[in-house]
Amino acid sequence: MAAPLVELRQMQKSFGGIHAVDHVSIDLNPGEVVGVLGHNGAGKSVLMKMLSGALPRDGGEIWINGAQATINNPRDARDYQIETIYQYLALADNLDAASNLFLGRELVTPMGFLDDATMEAETRRILARLNPNFRRFHTPVAGLSGGQRQSVAIARAVYFNAKILIMDEPTAALGVQETRMVAELIEQLKSEGIGIFLIDHDIHQVKLLCDRANVMKNGRLVGTVEVDKVTEDDMLGMIIAGKCPPSGIPGPGAIE
Amino acid sequence: MTDTSSAATAQPVKPRNFFAALEIDTRLLGMVGAFILICVIFSLLTDGRFMTPRNIFNLTIQTASVAIMATGMVFVIVTRHIDLSVGSLLATCSAVMAMIQTVVTPDWLGLGLNHPATAPIAIIAGIITGLAIGAFQGWLIGYLTIPAFIVTLGGYLVWRNVAWYLTTGQTIGPLDKNFQLFGGINGTLGQTWSWIFAAFAIVGALYVQFNARRTKVKHEFPVKPVWAEVVIGAIIAAAIIGFVAILNAYEIPTARLQRIYAARGEVMPDGLVAGYGIPISVLLLILVAIVMTIVAQRTRLGRYIFATGGNPEASQLAGINTRFLTVKVFAIMGALCALSAIVASSRQTFHSNDIGTLDELRVIAAAVIGGTALSGGLGTIYGAILGALIMQSLQSGMAMVGVDAPFQNIVVGTVLVVAVLIDIIYRRRTGD
Ligand SMILES: Nc1ncnc2c1ncn2[C@@H]1O[C@H](COP(=O)(O)OP(=O)(O)OP(=O)(O)O)[C@@H](O)[C@H]1O
Ligand SMILES: [Mg+2]
């Protein structure tokens, strides 16, 4: 079998005495949606932030397409076409949709000045595809609804041709309709061969969207399961008790 | 796919009223309104003396120094910092430039007094000094994460006394003749050049307006009705012409004209009248305003300054080096302090120990009255300049009316607080 799209090996991160992420190894294949589950403070976001370059890691290796990758900051991650939709919407509230979408990767004119008109046109095009209800292109995103803001964050990942997408509770701030929109989008991106790490507390949704799921507890990996082979109760047991079902591959955090 | 593309192009919206069609920033309108109100009130109280060309000329040169620094303070405050050291930094830059033109170039380099190279050397040295000190403070704030309030409070004491040390506490002057051209009345464009400047300014402004419209049309964005564009273009042209006409109407006294002609070894034609025109210090302010506005609106640097002010974390996640950005912002502030030092010291024709005293407060107040929010992420260059102009006109107006000095400061202080209150209420109403 070909090398996985992403392989995280023995990832480690401590804050003071707390082992937020403790020797966690997980992987992701192209066109696959892999869940990362766990109780609050289990270390899911920290693990993903090490992959997206937002946090420096204490130990471990990141392999992409079978080669070891150097990811020390968000720009490095972008070079590997890793895009992240953060749990706490990472938008500059005072800027409009286009400025946020292109933040850090602005289009410029031949003279080196910002090409706001082209950026706005591109933003209109991509948002028309993702969220046809989106109309407010000239107001700061602070004035947008949670779903509209999330559209901007998702548009950013889609526009820049992510190969690897990290979604940290992408629907936490959304209503029913917007949640469905995100779910449809995940299906679509998956069919395009993009690999997605999905952090979500909604087990039902995880069973619906994910191919495999990893469960973390107190910074350690409880195990990895194929969602079709386990019940929702099995998964709850992993999250709450740290018990890996027989069909899963137990990790160092599993109890007997 | 036809309907998705029509969703991408916005529908033309029917403007609600006259002002909405013009799409003029209401905050700008409010500040211009406040300024006009101040002018009207003081004109009435002074029997029109407030609105004479002479007073308006003085107002512009008194505003220049604070306004130049206020444009930099906008960037500082937008990135959620503060700079309390600008008055002291101005003093250090002024001291460096004064010592260079009175000691270094005439004696050490043996160029003598009023050599043509003196002013450029002094100015370059001053700007480098301001840039370096500003960058150093920015490094302490950005990389060593000492709060800006503390770093610049320290800087406030340090640079004021570095200036004292450089000059051993003495008044240094008179300054170089060419350097003094930045002092306002000692250096103006004259009538002809002022009109030429006006012509260039109008052509430039109309070109920018035309270009903006063309870009919008190219991308099929909604555009203002043509009559609205014409109205705005006419207002801009009228404002430029009016401004230059007023400054040109301030006549050079005959005795002074005679001296100018005598110095050139010519005889003054009988009955000659000549106006001062645009002061070079004001020209410098206009230049700074244009450059800073372009930086704020048209460059990555400006975009990152505002993004970082709006959400520092998001900016970092977007790959922006916010620490280095802090260094750049404070370096710009330092360089602008040096430009203000040129204007301030040449205006009084010498360097004094107390130069720039309390300027930090005036500069911060100008930026804040101009709509810069201390919470970060919001502010405009033109707002800060208008803020400086409003404060200066209040101050000089009260002085003309004969209000006691302590009472003047009470009023200015009150206006600062009320202006911010109005801004808060305005933002709450409009929701931005
Ligand atoms: N920047 C930080 N500094 C110190 N400790 C941190 C930091 N970020 C996370 N932690 C700690 O690391 C642990 C894991 O946090 P993490 O954000 O990964 O949790 P999570 O699994 O994403 O939880 P949630 O479901 O609530 O989002 C927590 O104990 C948290 O307090
Ligand atoms: Mg989290």
Image (cartoon, rainbow, N blue to C red):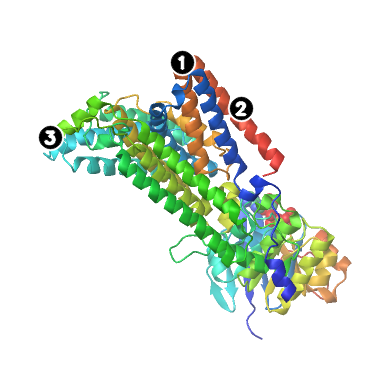
Q: Nearer the viewer, mark 2 or mark 3?
A: 3
Asked if badges 2 and 3 are on one and the same chain, I answer: yes
Calculate the distance from the C-alpha at mark 1 to the C-alpha at mark 3: 45 Å
Specify the amino acid type for callout 3.
Answer: Gly
Calculate the distance from the C-alpha at mark 2 to the C-alpha at mark 3: 55 Å
Q: Quadrant of residue B275?
A: top left
Residue B343 in the image: above or below residue B254: below
Q: Quadrant of the N terminus of chain B?
A: bottom right
Is the CB atom of the residue marked by disc 1 within 8 angstroms of ligand 1's nearest atom? no
Q: Residue under circle 3?
A: B265
Q: Quadrant of the C terminus of chain B?
A: top right
Q: Nearer the viewer, mark 1 or mark 3?
A: 3
- Say whether residue A82 is left or right of residue A199: left
Q: Nearer the viewer, residue B56 or B176?
A: B56
Label 1: few (<14), some or many (≥20) within 10 Å? few
Which residue shows up at 52% across the image and 50% down it?
A: B233
Calculate the distance from the C-alpha at mark 2 to the C-alpha at mark 1: 20 Å
Could you tell which of marks 1 and 3 lies nearer the N-terminus? 3
Could you tell which of marks 2 and 3 lies nearer the N-terminus? 3
x%, y% of residue A161?
A: 62, 73
What chain letter is assigned to the residue under label 3?
Answer: B
What is the number of the mark on residue B405? Answer: 1
